[in-house]
Image (spheres, rainbow, N blue to C red):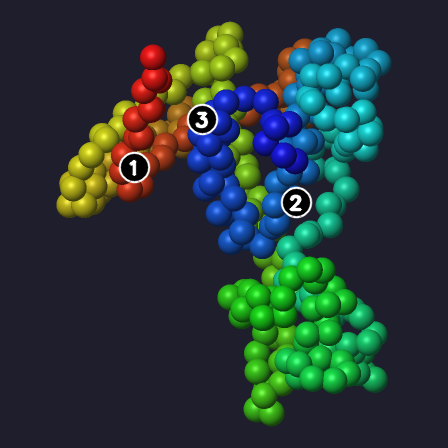
């Protein structure tokens, strides 16, 4: 998508990109691709648009959703089934991480397996079946060197004494482990985003949140800050357990009211630390 098709100022786009940078970094570390984030963002847009334009649960209008989200009607239609499906019951979206696609092909493609059904040990290059041909078959337009280094980083590949490449025994579980780690990250991020979104969309009654920052401190002061407020934060979070113990115990299967749905509440505390970035002055307009 070209910049000319994107609404919003350059500054607002850059600020949004900066806010998404930690998420992108976490996704890269968890072996998720940009395609996964883009799909999730489109899905979130469609769900938000449904909640905004169709709060009564009437028939969903695809054209209206396309207007609100900026997506095409075709995109909205393809996303709709996942958008209205309850959380947790959606279909799995194929992983687009190129190195994991190559690894999966190594495990499943008969051309790269021996008579016993196990992945072949592969020369990096040369004639016939080799790692380079495996990457061409399953990695798309990426280089075999780049895929090799990424599989090394993931600790999913090893060199045999003969100098050939071999996937590690539990290499096929790399993507699964990543998904489990990322699930906890997403859960915490969703709670945080739900609270701070009040800056743009008012809640009634509002949820309390506050933020204090020190724009410029020394490394020693930053360390002292973390130690001091980490202890205070731990004591605050312990209060949640004490509060829960003081609550009356629920009795019977119908303890939760059927009139209003059960609520999810929580308390989050986090510490921020990052290098100071000098804000650029806007160029003065010539008169």
Farthest residue in the front direction? 287
Q: Is residue 10 above or below residue 146?
A: above
* Whether residue 113 can be seen here: yes
Identify the element where label 2 is drawn. helix
Q: Is residue 139 above or below residue 45?
A: below
Q: Is residue 75 left or right of residue 223?
A: right
Query: Closer to the camera, 250 or 207?
Result: 207
Query: Closer to the camera, 116 or 38?
Result: 38
Mark 1 to mark 3: distance in Å?
A: 15 Å
Between disc 1 and disc 3, the foreground one is: 3
Identify the element where label 1 is drawn. loop
Identify the element where label 3 is drawn. helix
User: In what quadrant of the picture does the C terminus appear?
Assistant: top left
Which residue is label 2 attached to? 35
Which residue is label 1 attached to? 277
Mark 2 to mark 1: distance in Å?
A: 29 Å
Asked if labels 2 and 3 touch by Cβ distance under 8 angstroms, the answer is no
Q: Which mark is residue 11?
A: 3
**Image location of residue 172, percent across then percent down:** 67, 66
């Amino acid at each position: 998508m070209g910049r000319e098709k994107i609404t919003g100022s350059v500054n607002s786009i850059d600020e949004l990109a900066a806010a998404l940078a930690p998420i992108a970094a976490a996704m890269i570390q968890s072996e998720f691709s940009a395609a996964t984030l883009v799909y999730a963002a489109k899905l979130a847009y469609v769900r938000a648009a449904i909640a905004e334009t169709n709060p009564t649960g009437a028939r969903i209008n695809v054209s209206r959703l396309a207007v609100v989200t900026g997506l095409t009607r075709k995109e909205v239609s393809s996303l709709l089934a996942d958008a209205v499906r309850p959380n947790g019951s959606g279909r799995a979206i194929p992983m687009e991480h190129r190195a994991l696609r190559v690894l999966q092909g190594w495990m499943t493609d008969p051309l790269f397996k021996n008579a016993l059904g196990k992945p072949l040990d592969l020369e990096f290059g040369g004639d016939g079946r080799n790692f380079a041909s495996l990457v061409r078959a399953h990695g798309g337009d990426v280089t075999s060197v780049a895929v090799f280094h990424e599989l090394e980083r993931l600790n999913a590949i090893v060199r045999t004494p003969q100098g050939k490449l071999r996937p590690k025994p539990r290499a096929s579980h790399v993507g699964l482990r990543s998904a489990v780690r990322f699930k906890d990250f997403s859960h915490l991020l969703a709670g945080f985003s739900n609270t701070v979104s009040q800056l743009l969309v008012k809640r009634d009654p509002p949820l309390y949140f506050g933020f204090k920052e020190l724009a410029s401190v020394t490394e020693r002061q930053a360390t002292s800050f973390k130690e001091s407020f980490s202890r205070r934060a731990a004591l605050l979070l312990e209060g949640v357990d004490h509060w829960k113990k003081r609550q009356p115990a629920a009795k019977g299967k119908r303890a939760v009211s059927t009139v209003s749905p059960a609520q999810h509440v929580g308390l989050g505390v986090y510490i921020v630390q990052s290098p100071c970035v000098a804000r650029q002055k806007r160029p003065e307009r010539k008169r």
